[in-house]
Amino acid sequence: MRALMTPVLLFAYTLAGCAGDTSTATTPSAATTSFARAGGQASAPRPFAGRCELTVAPLPSTPPLVRQTDTGTCQFSHLGRTKYEGVLELDLAARTQRGERTLTAANGDELRLTTVGTSAPAGPGLVSFTATFTIVGGTGRFANATGQGRAEGTANLITSKTSVAMDGWIDYDASGRSGS
């Protein structure tokens, strides 16, 4: 039992020691969105928003780095109901965190994101967090996707459950052609 509690306590300590993030999503400029995608399909940024309910599990780690997996489901604009999988790495010494996420739409198309963020205590056993995300492509219609935004949520360290709201923009070939 003690061996299992150590990663959880380190995770809680890390999250409690982090400061809030002040980053915000920005809308892309006309110069970055006026180009045509492969195959001649013009693209335009669209709002990207949704909510996720996740379960967190610690991975084998060596302090000061603590790693965890996040899995669950989300409901997003332009994806619908999605499967969420990710890995988050917390650096206890630097008090930073970063992650990689994959959102899988019902048809199997994947959207990949990277995240960076910070956290703060929000009550007994609770941690609130903010992060920025960058969309870095995927598969199918999201093969050349770009975008960015902000994620905010609360992690419950007792139940290992996390709730996340995401809001930003996405640019992808809505015709379903990946261009490759």
Image (spheres, rainbow, N blue to C red):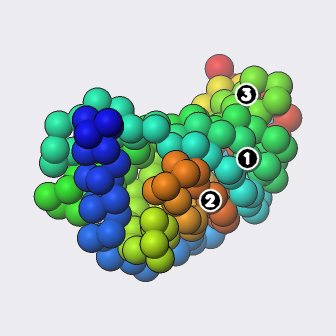
| Residue 59 in view of the camera | yes
Neighbours of disc 3 within 10 Å: few (<14), some (14-19), many (20+): some
Image height check: is 40 above or below 129?
above
* Disc 2: which residue: 164
* Disc 3: which residue: 109
> Quadrant of residue 66 in the image?
top left
Image height check: is 88 above or below 19?
above
- First in sequence: mark 2 or mark 3? 3
Q: Residue at x 59, y 37 (%)?
A: 71
- Residue 92 locus on image (x, y percent): 20, 56
Q: Nearer the viewer, residue 45 or 81?
A: 81
Q: Residue at x 85, y 35 (%)?
A: 175
Neighbours of disc 2 within 10 Å: few (<14), some (14-19), many (20+): some
> Quadrant of residue 59 in the image?
top left
- First in sequence: mark 1 or mark 3? 1
Q: Nearer the viewer, residue 27 or 105?
A: 105
- Report how far apart the C-alphas of labels 2 and 1 lie in the structure: 9 Å
Q: Nearer the viewer, residue 116 or 90?
A: 90
Which residue appears farthest toward the front when viewing the image?
1
Q: Residue at x 58, y 43 (%)?
A: 55
Give the mark toward the camera: 2 or 3.
Answer: 2
Image height check: is 86 above or below 48?
above
Give the label on residue 74, or none: 1
- Report how far apart the C-alphas of labels 2 and 3 lie in the structure: 21 Å
